[in-house]
């Protein structure tokens, strides 16, 4: 089955109708002026090297003492201060601002061209850099299934047990095949909306509103909250135990072939979960994707939430373009050479 064909949606789409929807201390002298210029140019060259290379480390330059501990160089009244070395707080702040600006510039055409509203959150765990575009809430559709499984595992941890064989097989079907019946069964097992809300307090999600009744797919969330959830799933410091994290990661790494789209468009290796649904009142599509991807030799946690696409294939293309743009904003690689929105 081809998920990018609007007439053939993959498994996992919510079948029920969905109601409308209710961010050095010497004095200066003339003969030293050339040397200062050489040093300044050298430092500036380091700032422009590569794809946020080793100097980006939040620990700074490990091969030399911090700038504050080095002898100062007295400059003339008309001289500009030398650029901060890579890795310094000022450089990191500037880089973060550049990433946010680049991300916004690359994502804005998606909305302008098609009317699809996109929210993106991305974290590079190796450097702790993150960027967010869009703060609005989106319906999760099947993206909520990762949240449901995390809530189930937290409950089992509190009870001091592992998942039962039935819970494990049902969770596998829910994540790998995006099976809705399995999601409904585990939704009831965790206590539906109130159970998800309690789990999210532990996980650190602050802007997620659980769906009411049996409507787990109507859970509303932000890209920032889903990035928090991804961090709980993949990072060592987490309310989820190592065994719980391993289980979710295993399922997210075995997604059915017809659902290999979304954030995997910009990655050589990936763990992901997608969500999709056509809104009954507008006939527009909500298309979501999140996961961990490896691209250009680096690891990223990516969340792409969207709504308003005229077709499922259009929404998938918008999400994939957003994923590529997010990685480009961090790595300064070439963005998509042409629009991939169909």
Image (spheres, helix red, strand yellow):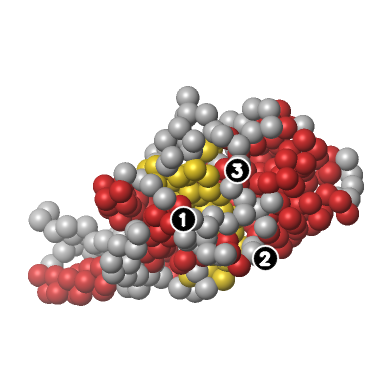
**Which residue is denoted by mark 2 in the rendering?**
254
Closer to us: 190 or 333: 190
Disc 3 secondary structure class: loop
Closer to the observer: label 2 or label 1?
1
**Which residue is denoted by mark 3 in the rendering?**
14
Residue at (57% x, 64% y) in the render: 1
| Residue 273 location (% of width, % of height) | 60, 55
Residue 11 shows up from this direction: yes
Q: Which residue lies furthest to the front in this view?
A: 7
Q: Earlier in the sequence, mark 2 or mark 1?
A: 1
* Labels 2 and 1 touching (C-beta < 8 A): no
Closer to us: 142 or 247: 142
- Residue neighbourhood size for the residue with mark 2, other residues' Cα within 10 Å, grouped as few (<14), some (14–19), many (≥20): some
* Labels 1 and 3 touching (C-beta < 8 A): no
Left or right: 24 as drawn, with respect to 315: left
Quarter-of-image position of residue 270: bottom right
Quarter-of-image position of residue 10: bottom right
Left or right: 85 as drawn, with respect to 237: left
| Residue 217 location (% of width, % of height) | 60, 39
Left or right: 51 as drawn, with respect to 287: left
Left or right: 185 as drawn, with respect to 66: right
Closer to the observer: label 3 or label 2?
3
The correct choice, above or below, for 15 with respect to 22 in the image is below
Closer to the observer: label 1 or label 3?
1
The correct choice, above or below, for 214 with respect to 127 in the image is above
- How many dots with numbers? 3
Q: How far apart are marks 3 and 2 (CA)?
A: 21 Å
Residue at (43% x, 57% y) in the render: 313
Q: Distance between the residues labelled 1 and 3?
A: 15 Å
**Which residue is denoted by mark 1 in the rendering?**
6
């Amino acid at each position: 089955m081809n998920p990018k064909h609007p007439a053939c949606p993959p498994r996992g789409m919510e079948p029920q109708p969905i109601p409308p929807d209710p961010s050095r201390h010497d004095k200066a002298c003339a003969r030293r002026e050339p040397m200062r210029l050489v040093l300044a140019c050298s430092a500036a060259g380091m700032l422009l090297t590569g794809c946020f290379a080793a100097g980006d480390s939040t620990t700074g330059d490990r091969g030399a003492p911090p700038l504050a501990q080095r002898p100062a160089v007295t400059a003339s009244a008309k001289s500009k201060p030398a650029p901060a070395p890579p890795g310094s707080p000022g450089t990191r702040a500037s880089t973060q601002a550049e990433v946010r600006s680049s991300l916004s510039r690359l994502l804005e055409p998606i909305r302008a061209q098609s009317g699809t509203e996109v929210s993106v959150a991305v974290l590079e765990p190796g450097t702790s850099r993150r960027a967010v575009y869009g703060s609005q809430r989106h319906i999760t559709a099947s993206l909520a299934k990762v949240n449901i499984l995390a809530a189930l595992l937290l409950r089992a941890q509190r009870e001091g047990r592992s998942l039962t064989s039935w819970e494990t097989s049902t969770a596998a079907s829910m994540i790998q095949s995006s099976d809705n019946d399995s999601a409904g069964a585990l939704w009831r097992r965790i206590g539906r909306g109130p159970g998800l809300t309690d789990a999210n307090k532990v996980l650190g999600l602050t802007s997620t509103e659980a769906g009411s009744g049996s409507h787990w797919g109507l859970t509303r969330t932000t890209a920032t909250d889903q990035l928090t959830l991804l961090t709980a799933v993949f990072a060592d410091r987490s309310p989820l135990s190592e065994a719980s994290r391993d289980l979710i990661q295993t399922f997210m790494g075995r997604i059915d072939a017809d659902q290999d789209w979304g954030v995997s468009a910009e990655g050589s290796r990936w763990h992901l979960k997608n969500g999709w649904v056509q809104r009954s009142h507008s006939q527009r599509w909500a298309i979501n994707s999140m996961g961990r991807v490896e691209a250009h030799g680096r690891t990223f946690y990516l969340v792409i939430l969207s709504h308003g696409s005229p077709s499922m294939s259009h929404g998938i293309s918008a999400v994939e373009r957003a994923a590529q743009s997010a990685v480009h904003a961090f790595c300064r690689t070439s963005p998509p050479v042409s629009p991939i929105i169909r």
